[in-house]
Amino acid sequence: MFPLDFVERFIDGYIWGCILFYRTLSTTMHLAKQFCMRNLLRPVSLAIALCLVAGSSLPVAIGQNVPIVGVNSELLRSQMTEGKRFEKDRRWQEAILHYEKLLKKDPKLAACNERLQICRVHFDVTRRYSDRSFMQVVETSSASDAFQVLMEVLTKLEVYYVEPIDYYKLALHGTAFLEVALTEQDFCSCHLQNADAVSVEEFRKTIHKAVFNKKIQTVEELKSIIAFVATQASQRIGLSPTAVVYEYIAGSVGLLDPYSSLLTPGEYREVMSQIDGNLIGLGVELWAEGSELRIVDVFRGGPAQLAGIAPSQYILQVDGSSVQEIGAKKAADLLRGPEGSTVRLVLRTIDDQMLNLEVQRKRVDVPSVTVTEMAEPNIGYIRITNFQKTTAAEVTRAMMTLSREGMRSVIIDLRRNPGGLLDSAVELADQFLTRGSIVSTVGRNGQESHNFTATAPAWDIPLVVLIDGDSASASEIFAGAINDHNRGTIVGQTSYGKGSVQGVFHNEHGNGGLRLTVSKFFSPKGTPISARGVQPQVLVDLPDPVPSSDTVVALKAAIDSKRFVSSKQEQPDTAKLKAIEVARQKVSFGR
C-alpha cells in the first residue's frame, strides 16, 4: 500500500503535466476569479443563458516549473509553505484563495500556478460529492445515461466553446479528475469502500498506459477510451462506470479554463434563480471549509435575520447532523430545501452562547441596488452589488428618487461587484450613453460575436464610477464603456481584469447544467479587459486591511447596510470620500 501523500505527489505531477503541456495557450487568454454569478444574453436557444461570471484565474505558465529564486525567494517559500499547509488539511477553498492572492501579485509564479490548478481539481471533486443532487444523479443513472450526458456536453463544447476543442486534452483532463477523485474521502466512501490500495494503484497504472500518448482526435475515439477506463474500473476495483464517466465529464470542462465547469442540478437551479434576483433558502451567505460553517452575511428581512441569526455566528448542527462530523460542505448542502420546509439549527454566537432555532426556508428577494442615498447635498449615491434582470429598472427608480431630492451629480459604486448579466450591464450603460459602442463580444463562431450600441435618450448628469480590484466582468463592461466615452470619472483601483463571457446551459440528460466560456469581450475602443482591467482616472491607494478577531474571510466580502445585517463597526471609506470630492467638483465646474 502506498502512503496517501506519495500517491498525491505522484498524481499532482501527472495532473500538472497534463495542464502545463497540453493546455491551449494564448496571449489573450481570459483571466478572472471564480465565484459564479449569472448571465443572460440575447435570444436563448437550447436553454442557454449567456453569462458573465467573476471567477478566479491566472495565466498558465509556459515552460518548465522552476525553483523559487530571486530577491523575495524566502518570502515566497514561506507563502508557498502556508498554501501547502492548507492543502495538507484539505482546505482547498482557502488554498485556492491563497494562491490566487500570490498570483495576483506576480502571475509568473509557475510553482504557485501549478498548486492552484491542482487545488481547483480537488475542490471541484469535493464540491460535487458534497452535493446531494449530484450524488443522486450518479447513484440513479446507468453508464448509458452518463454517456448521453457526455455526448451532450461534448456537442456543446464543439459548438459554443471559445477555443477549438482538443479531444486528447479532454482525455487527459478527465483522467486527472478521476485520479484526484480516487484520493478524496467523499468519493471513496461513496464508491470504493471495499477496494484495496494496491488494486487502485494497478488500475491507475493501467489507465496511464491507455491514455498517455494515445491518438485521440475525434469524439468517438474519446468515447472509446472513456468506455475502456470505465470497464477497467468496474472489473479491477469495483468502481461504478457511471461515476467514472462523470469524472471525465467534469474534467473535460473543468480544466478548459477557470470559469467553465459542470453544474450540479442544485447549482444550476440556484444560478437560474439568481438571474431573476431571488433565491429559496434562509437568506444567508456562508463560509464553508473543513468543519467550519460560518455565517458571513445575513440578508435583511430574510428568514435567517428574522430568526435571530447574525454574521460571525457558527452553525454547529443541521437537522441533528454535526458539522464537525459530516464536514461544512455537506452541512451547507443540508440547508437547501424546498420553499416552505424547515431546518433545525444549532449555532454558536460571538459570545459563545448556543442558539437552537427552527427556520423556514422562503423565497428571498435579492436586490441589485442595495444603497440609494444622498451622500451630501447635490450628490447622489447608488450601490450596485451585482447585475441581474432587475438592475436597470432598480437604477432607474433610484435615479428618479435622487433627482426628486435635488441630485446634480451621481456616484455609481461597483466595488466588490463580481458581475452578472451581460444584458444588464449593457442596459445600464445605455442609460448614461447616447450613442456609440458599449461592448463587443468575439466568439469562435459568429453566433457569439456581437456589438452592443447605445441608444438615446440617457441621463444627462455628471457621473462618477467607483471600482476596485473585485469589480469584475459586467462591472468592467459598464466602467469600460463610461471610461472610453469620457462620460464620467472612474475612481478607485484597477478592476479585476476578467474579459470573457460564459454561457449557462441546461443538460437535458442528467438534470444539471454546464457553464462554458463562449466569447471574449472588448471595450468600445477595442481594448481587451482580460488581465488589464479598467484603469481608474483617479487612483485611490488603500492599505491592506489589518486582521482583527472578527475578521470574516469569504469569497464575497461585501457588507451593505441596507442589504445585510452586520455585526462590525464600519471603517472610514476613503475611496467613497474621494468619489464624493470628485462629484462635488463636477457640480461646481461641470463634467
Image: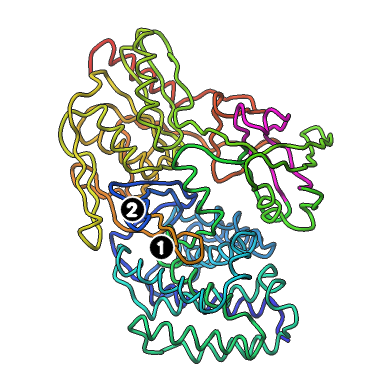
- Where's residue 120, x and y in %? 53, 63
- Where's residue 427, x and y in %? 29, 34
Front residue of this view, candidates 344 and 520: 344
Residue extending farthest left: 436
Mark 2 and mark 1 lie on one chain; the one further toward the N terminus is 1
Distance of label 2 from label 1 (alpha carbons) = 11 Å
Dot 2 falls on a residue whose secondary structure is strand
- Where's residue 111, x and y in %? 50, 67
**Mark 2 — residue?**
500
The range drawn in magenta is 292-318
**Mark 1 — residue?**
257
The quadrant the N terminus occupies is bottom right
**Badge 1 amino acid:** Asp
Magenta stretch: includes residue 304: yes
Do the numbered discs 2 and 1 sit on residues whose CB atoms are within 8 Å?
A: yes
Q: Quadrant of residue 89?
A: bottom right
* Residue 463 shown left or right of residue 189 in the figure: left
Front residue of this view, candidates 410 and 81: 410
